Amino acid sequence: MKLGIICAMDVEAALLKECMRNATTTTYAHMDYVEGTLEDCPAVVVRCGIGKINAAVCVQNLVNRFGVTHVINSGAAGSLDNRIDILDIVVSTDAIHHDVDATIFGYAAGEVPGLGVASFFADEDLRAVVRAAITQAHEKYAVFEGRVASGDQFIADDATKTRIKDTFDALCCEMEGASIAQACWLNDVPFVIIRAISDKADDSKQIEYPVFEKIAAHQSAKVVMLVAAQLAARL
């Protein structure tokens, strides 16, 4: 097993990189891939940058150049569900592109034409490991499992939030997860997305996001470390 861990921003990747042992750094496509062990699990941690194209390029490099066998996407997201509060955790069941629309040709909302699937499902075993890791955490996280919606857009108004929620029945929104999920699906690589909520994806973002971004990012990273320890125990 070799774990690829993708974060969009430096604040999301920093803690994980600091905890890597025997680390070496290689740069491809302007992304620094830090390879070593995380909690005794062979791993590569990388900040892919913002957006879906960066995320897809990152996955392909992890597969082709580093031979990762499993992928985790960690970071912050905006809540689409009123039950899910800031700093709660969302674990993906599947991921979908909320900014893809080929419905005029008969495709489902969010479906990329030609693939035969509308969303990309997370690996059941990885999801189980995440649940077990969170159960053992010292901190008591409120955890929700469900769909992650992604698009090249920072959602920050009530109307757009409502449209995405009503159309896709997603729990949270962000800008990389579905692209990572699709790239993993294309490469037959198991994946899971772990997101800590940093904001409500509505008009309150001006106050919430700067305050909670770093806290949420570190919260998600801590869960990833617990997952890595669980996976290492299997080796």
Image: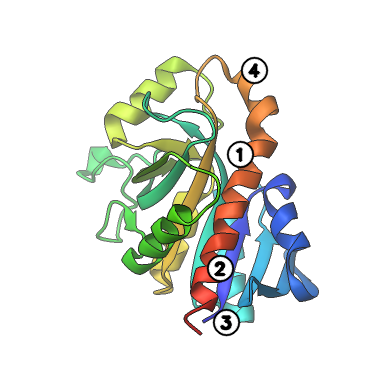
Q: Secondary structure at mark 1?
A: helix
Q: Which mark is residue 206?
A: 4
Mark 3 or mark 2: which is in front? 2
| Residue 138 point in image, percent of width and height | 55, 50
Residue 56 shows in this picture: no
Q: Select label 2 or label 4 by which is in front.
A: 2
User: Which residue does the image show at 33% across and 43% down from the upper left?
Assistant: 110
Q: Which of marks 4 and 2 precedes in the sequence?
A: 4
Horizontally, residue 169 falls left or right of residue 36, namely left
Which of the 4 quarters of the picture holds residue 189?
A: bottom left
Residue at which label 2 appears: 228
- Spatial CA distance of label 4 from label 3 is 40 Å
Neighbor class of circle 1 (other Cα within 10 Å; few <14, some 14-19, many 20+) is many
Q: Mark 3 and 2 residues: CB-CB less than 8 Å, in contact?
A: no
SS of the residue at dot 3? Answer: loop
The answer to whether the residues at label 2 and label 4 have Cβ atoms under 8 Å apart is no
Residue that numbered label 3 is attached to: 67
Residue 148: x %, y % from top left: 40, 44
Which comes sooner in the sequence, label 1 or label 4? 4
Q: CA distance from mark 1 to mark 3?
A: 29 Å
**Which residue in the structure is indicated by mark 1?**
216
- Mark 1 → mark 2, Cα distance in angstroms: 19 Å
Q: Amino acid at mark 4?
A: Gln
User: Is residue 25 rendered to the left or right of residue 89?
Assistant: right
Q: Is residue 117 above or below residue 42?
A: above
Q: Residues within 10 Å of mark 3 (few under 14, many from 20)?
A: some
Instruction: Give how far apart the Cα atoms at labels 3 and 2 are.
Output: 17 Å
